[in-house]
Image (spheres, rainbow, N blue to C red):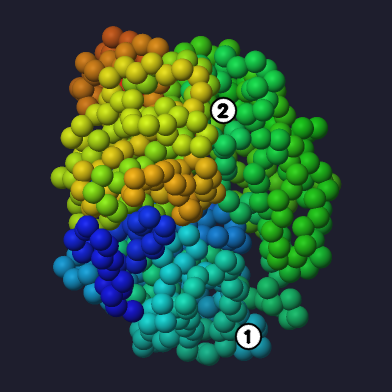
Amino acid sequence: MNKISRILQVAFAAPLLFPLASFAQDGEVILPLYHNKAMQQAAIHSAQNSFKAASTDTLKLPFFDDFSTNSVWPDANLWSDSSAFVNFNFPMNPPTVGVATFDGLDKEGNPYNNSNVNAIGLCDNLTSKAIDLFADDNGLPYNVSDSLFMTFYYQRKGLGDNPEAADSLVLQFLDPSTQTWNSVWKVVGATSGDTSFTRVRVSINDPAYRQNGFKFRFRNYGSLTGMLDLWHVDYVFLNKFLPPDYENIRDFAFVYQGYSLLNNYSSVPWKHFAALPAAQQQGFVKSTADLTLRNNNETNPFPIKVAGTSYDQYGTATAIVGGGGLNSIQIPLNSNLAPPATINLNTFFTDPTTGDEATFTEVYELGQTSGGIVDDFPENDTLTYKQHFHNYYAFDDGSAELGYGVVGIGAQIAYKFEILQPDTLRAVQFYWAQLGLSVTNQLFKLAVWSGSSSGPGGGPVYQKFNQTPNNVDSINGFYTYLTDPIALSAGTWFFGFIQNNSVILNLGLDVNTPAVPSRKFINTTGSWVNSQLPGMWMIRPIVSSTPIDVGISEPIDGSQISIFPIPASTQLHIQTDFDNPDEFYVELLDIAGRSLIEQQGANSVLDTHDISSGIYFVRIVHSLSGNSYSRKVVISGN
């Protein structure tokens, strides 16, 4: 479909150069992303941003991938190209955590075509390595009567942009003898997206494909100009199946990545949380963990259990799912279930941390009630989530799926937060999405309002003029706007902006977090109303009793930092010449930006025993200013 036909034109505004906008009351707009920061940063920092498969690197059956690995690209052990985007954020109700997403962005997260907003055509490819369909792992040829099948799931749209009737997802098989690709399955877009995944089974009976060197590939056709016309593929399985159990799969899995353990917030300042009476602390913690499990079995399943453990930053373990685990969960076949995994409310209360932050790592694991291996695919049986308490308040999960804006000269947005303890505002962070044409020359006023639960009261109590939407050169990066010190009493406060012009400023929108309209206020007509669009805005106020050290450069001076050995095997040492190293924390990130290790203090030794070989990043962050420094590291030998 020619998406430019949906360009918006609104009163008091020039035509907006963004297709696919959704309009709601009073000029709210949601827009798809036109760049992928995770893939951009992985491509910039990784020296191995494309896969090179040897011609003799041939796989044997079974072939399986559910994209549950921590990488923005498909597993190089299975796939020979990398333009599809592996992620946990864009699908709805996937068979397992993680999917491969097909859109109009290349392997580096940029549009295939930046010169023509109407450009459509072939977009992403996901191509398997060569597979031997002639003989099995023992060298025995397959019989003509053997049933070779490929099964997979797909979904239109999910939490992204919907593919229309002219867009398609195609599966092709390679004839090794002629090196000819043939289309064997196709699905087209629809008027609306899917809320669930559809399962497909394709038989491989043609002798032309039953050879050594067989390959298959998925490819999508659609807009070439951004993260548009999304398709999600999951649970790709190719094997010899025995009738009548053509899909004799034995697998239980987690469906989503972890979520905050806090009611309402994804993070609050540690000082504020720790100062609350025990009863109020318990009120902030969810009564049950947000876990979703799926039974992908094709035969009668056995009961399973869920065990959960919380580790503070000193390694002290506490059972988070009480009683040593939730036992005897029976999940219907091919179904999802949210088990009542009750949280141990004492999880956070024994940490002796002082200062502005604390981190707790929550690890959930599936197991058999009778012991033993849960299933044939253990990769999706463990879920890890880090609950951060820094010096800011947040509702979002740190990942933007869409962009948000309001239209109108002087349009305002105000985000409601309940400040738990009296403190001083030092900065406000905004996540700005990259949507087509740059808006970094557009001016706005950062604004703070007092008020009540019904909305801001009167005009702003503070404004910082002539600010611009700045993108940060990091994965899922927030830009920090320093403010004058503003005394905040405990209670309701609002943080947001007042734009000078009618141009959409592209605020990041986290649609994985359910919308709470009573927290989101907009004013485009002279009065405040609640936003009715999905998701939560990506705005974070930073508080501290002491001034932020503006003497620290942006970025942090890398010449003061030593990281060794490179490559690392069992330990990674970080040493700095900082005057106050305790004001920093250190993270080890994978190439998708997910935090694997976090330790307080700039001078740290990271234990990398359990980290797989590959390319990672060490990030050193100043807790008060939010300024950071990142460096690529290599871990090998594990």
User: In the rendered image, is residue 50 in sight?
Assistant: no
For label 2, the residue is 360
Would residue 110 appear left or right of 329 to someone viewing this image? left
Q: CA distance from mark 2 to mark 1?
A: 54 Å
Q: Which mark is residue 253?
A: none
Mark 1 secondary-structure assignment: loop
> Would you identify the image quadrant in which residue 198 lies?
bottom right
Question: Measured from the top left, where is residue 549 in percent x and y?
Answer: 28, 15
Q: Answer whether labels 2 and 1 touch (C-beta < 8 Å).
A: no
The answer to whether residue 225 is above or below residue 449 is below
The answer to whether residue 12 is above or below residue 497 is below
Question: Measured from the top left, where is residue 130 in percent x and y?
Answer: 43, 71
Residue type at mark 1 is: Asn
For disc 2, the neighbor class at 10 Å (few under 14, some 14 to 19, many from 20) is many
The tag earlier along the polypeptide, 2 or 1, is 1
Mark 2 secondary-structure assignment: strand
Question: Measured from the top left, where is residue 123 in percent x and y?
Answer: 32, 71
Residue drawn at point x = 74 percent, y = 69 percent: 298
- Front residue of 121/304: it is 121
For disc 1, the neighbor class at 10 Å (few under 14, some 14 to 19, many from 20) is few
Q: Which mark is residue 143?
A: 1
Residue drawn at point x = 80 percent, y = 50 percent: 329
Would residue 377 appear left or right of 215 to someone viewing this image? right
